[in-house]
Image (tube, grey):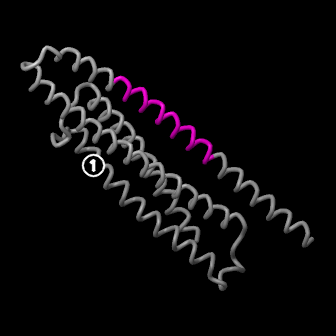
Amino acid sequence: MNQLLKQATQLENKIEQKLITYQNLATKIEDELFQEPIVSNNISTSEQLFEAITEEIDHLLKELREVNDRMKEFIKDENNHSILSSSIVYQYEQHETFFNRIKQEFKSRRQRLANKKNRNDLLYISDEEDVNNENDSLLGSSRESEIQRLRDTNIRMQNLITQGHTSKAALEEQMEIFRNFDRVLNNMKGKSILI
């Protein structure tokens, strides 16, 4: 079991390192998208790196899932109950919590970027239509200002959504800490009754 705990810790460290790069690349891609709309079929170097890091994190998460599943089997096996301690079970629960939190964070970050790319594509189409119609209409400049206003509104909304996601993640993390604390207290309470 100690070997599995060690493996899980090593995988978590690798995942956290990759996530830093992942977050930085996602931010860079978003900045590129909002500087000027470009069709998302044109893949930048940042996006290529982002895809590579995404695959690496996916692979590491699968490995961590397997290690956590093996720990769970070990804990459930009645033959191992005599060598199990509450600290081992607690460590397993921490690894499981980490996995669930990181998986959710990874999934939501990936989805946010995909949504921003979709919005970027819509803005790109609007810009293309604007360029095509500008020669035919005196309203070209008002369309341009309307598109800019939409972009600015979009950026403000994205900032609010990002703040909301950050707040939600912090609250979920605090909630999990309180749950774990409650479990530890209940375990201690149960043990003190037996004494």
In the rendered view, tell whether residue 61 sits above or below residue 152: below
Residue 195 location in percent, x, y? 92, 71
In the rendered view, tell whether residue 47 sits above or below residue 133: below
Disc 1, SS: helix
Taking depth in this image into account, of 100 and 117 the one nearest to the observer is 117
Taking depth in this image into account, of 77 and 118 the one nearest to the observer is 118
Q: Is residue 61 magenta?
A: no
Q: Residue at x 42, y 26 (%)?
A: 156
Q: Is residue 162 magenta?
A: yes
Image side of residue 136 versus residue 172, left or right: left
Q: Quadrant of residue 153?
A: top left
- Residue pointed to by mark 1: 51
Q: Quadrant of residue 24?
A: top left
In the rendered view, tell whether residue 146 sits above or below residue 170: above
Residue 127 location in percent, x, y? 18, 28
Q: Amino acid at mark 1?
A: Glu
Taking depth in this image into account, of 113 and 21 the one nearest to the observer is 113
Q: Residue at x 58, y 68 (%)?
A: 2
Stretch in magenta? 152-173
Q: Residue at x 66, y 84 (%)?
A: 78
Residue 53 location in percent, x, y? 32, 49
Image side of residue 8 versus residue 18, left or right: right
State whether the magenta stretch is mostly helix, strand or loop. helix
In the rendered view, tell whether residue 143 sits above or below residue 59: above
Q: Residue at x 47, y 36 (%)?
A: 161
Image side of residue 22 versus residue 125, left or right: right
- Mark 1 Cα-neighbour bin, 10 Å: few <14, some 14–19, many ≥20: some
Residue 3 location in percent, x, y? 53, 68
